[in-house]
Amino acid sequence: MPYITRPSRQSDYKKFPTSCPIVIDNGASNFRIGWAGEYDPRLTFRNVVQRPRHKTTGETVTIVGDHDPALMRYFDCTRSSYRSAFDSNVVYQFEIMEYVEHPVLMTECVCSPVQSRSKMAELLFETYGVPSIAFGVDAAFSYKYNQELGLCNNDGLAICSGFSTSHVIPFVDGEPIFEACSRTNVGGYHVTDYLKQLLSLKHPNHMSSITWEKVEELKMEHCYVALDYASEARIFQKGEKEAEEKTRRWQLPWVPPIEESPSEEEIARKAAIKEKQGQRLREMAAAKRYSRITELENELQGLEFLLQQLENVEEDDVPSFLVETGYGSKQEIESAVVKVTQSLRKAKGEQVEIEEKLEPSNAEKFPLVNVPDNVLSPEQLKEKKKQLFLKTTSEGRQRAKQKRFEEEQQRERQNQQDEEKRLENPELYLEQLRAKHRELSEKVEQRKRLKTNGARTNGNHNFSGGVGRGERLNAAQKERMRLLTTAAFDRGKGEDTFGVRDEDWQLYKLMSKDNDDDDEGQDEDEAELVRVTSRLQDIDPTFVAKPESSSFQPIAEVPRYRPLTKEDFQITLGVERFRCPEILFQPNMIGIDQAGLDEMTGISIQRLPSKGNGIEDRITSSVLVTGGSCLFPGIVERLEAGIRKIRPFESPIRVVRASDPVLDAWRGAAAYAAAAQFSYQTFSRQDYYEKGEDWLRRYRMKYTV
């Protein structure tokens, strides 16, 4: 069953005779209904219908107009949305209108399709049995009502900007000239939708708060029409003081955070939880360690048992025995025993001693390195070349490993010394550490610039970037480049024999970056900078490291947490205040290729069937602006300036706003229906059944009664 608000007193229905007409302003935004001759409508509600389901019974109910939040909590609205009976001010869903023995006067948009008028007449006659009905244009009723008030003349122009469309209707001798009217499919709905889109893009974190109803409220409170759109936009673009004064802010609900220090009980509780978690982690680590030790002991016993069995195997049967075990030789099994033993000691926490005697020497690993070439076969020469390469690579890895170990020990000793100095005089130590950090940072940055731009500078000590690659290389890098070029040149002469001779591997060592003293010095400075930076971060809470200061270790800057403030919960309306209503004059801003309100005025004047006798001047001297979308401040001045641009010099132009742009259409219709001649403008149910739809096509109301 439909829910709809009814008059508060049932006796109100008995005050009016059966012949008293009912006036309905069937607008796309709001539905207004009342009795003829009254000043205000009895009912006003949103012209929408929703059909949700009851949460308990599952019954589908129909809710018309505005809903009561206390009522809606009993219904499931997730699968139902508001539906309107209109499509651009034309009724097309008549089943929604099914919601009176009195004549009915109903408003409609200008040049409404005959099918829409026919369906509405069919609904009123056949469903509700009304005795007679009349249709009239809402903008015409508003103009005639304001004419009675003395705001406009007998000849004039009505500019009606409604919810979904805007119309311009000329009036000559008090009657609308529908042949000269203009229409644009832009109205208040589009302004609200455009404002909602802009605010959602501007404040994506508060999209749930930017509802349609709230945006509609913000539009009516804060939006205005700029007299000169380009000049107004430049004010906000330059960020002048006037722009700040015109900016409005909507404060969302926000509760300032209250920082409370934890109590002693809370601290003790957290400490107990932390200790319990630590104990659990220690128990898990101990169980994992015990499992690892047991696994290694079993593996070691298996390898020792395998060696014992290998001692009892005859020499001829050793290869087949090893194939079954998966090992290639006795030395491989012994090496596995050594590795498992070291892993077991490490798992038990014992000191692991590196036994050099168990590690095979270079002579055992690479037996062909020291053998002369003249005693080797071609296959052995290839194997020797391979062993030379492996030997050089192995020695390089060992040197790098030893170097890292020594650097780690040096770093630990340095940290111990720094800690002793810090304990002696913390302030002096911190000052010295900061000075050292600045010195190292400048040195590293200078080397980076030299490496990028070269060592040559001009008189102003500005680094020049227009140098060649050779000028950016130091001595060691130039020598390496020369050796590489020579080796490449020799290689192109014939067969590739590089690596066969010992001199080739000496050349390889010279070309290695390990011998670049300058690079080593640079690495030392950068490593020291890393150590000093880490040290400062540990002891100085105010120190912030610069990621760009070290190219060797890029560090992504982690955004610092900033507590939310009151400003973070504000919706700002700046340029949106006049940008959104501007689509009434420039619909192309939202992709609608149609004329604006001022341009439509010129089009309607050009479409007048009879020109001359000063009719254009009389029309432009009485321009009435009506409709809900003409409530924006500045729209009258903007229309006057726009019409003045398309009219001849010194043409009389006067633009006025209706006394009540929202209700004047209903009030004009109510006054018209209360007149004695209204009955001659209606058609009855009998006329409808006898003459049919073709008579509705030729029906036109006379507004001068």
Image (cartoon, grey):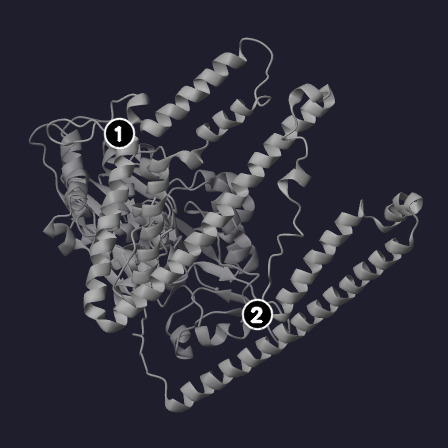
Residue 139 percent across, percent down from the top left? 30, 47
Element under disc 1: helix
Q: Nearer the viewer, residue 667 or 203?
A: 203
Label 1: few (<14), some or many (≥20) within 10 Å?
Answer: many
Amino acid at dot 2: Met
519 shown above or below 109: above
Residue 461 percent across, percent down from the top left? 14, 32
The CA distance from mark 1 to mark 2 is 83 Å
Residue 250 percent across, percent down from the top left? 27, 63
Q: Is residue 73 left or right of residue 568?
A: right
Inspect this view and state whether residue 211 appears.
Answer: no
* Residue placed under numbered mark 1 in the picture: 453
8 shown above or below 320: below
Q: Residue drawn 32% across and 38% down?
A: 589
Residue 180 percent across, percent down from the top left? 30, 33
Inspect this view and state whether residue 424 appears.
Answer: yes
**Which quarter of the picture shows residue 301?**
bottom right
Q: Nearer the viewer, residue 544 or 109?
A: 544
Q: Which mark is residue 1?
A: 2
Q: Is residue 285 left or right of residue 120?
A: right
Amino acid at dot 1: Asn
Q: Which mark is residue 175?
A: none
Q: Residue drawn 67% across and 19% down?
A: 374
Label 2: few (<14), some or many (≥20) within 10 Å?
Answer: few
User: Which mark is first along the chain, 2 or 1?
Assistant: 2
Is label 1 or label 2 in front? 1
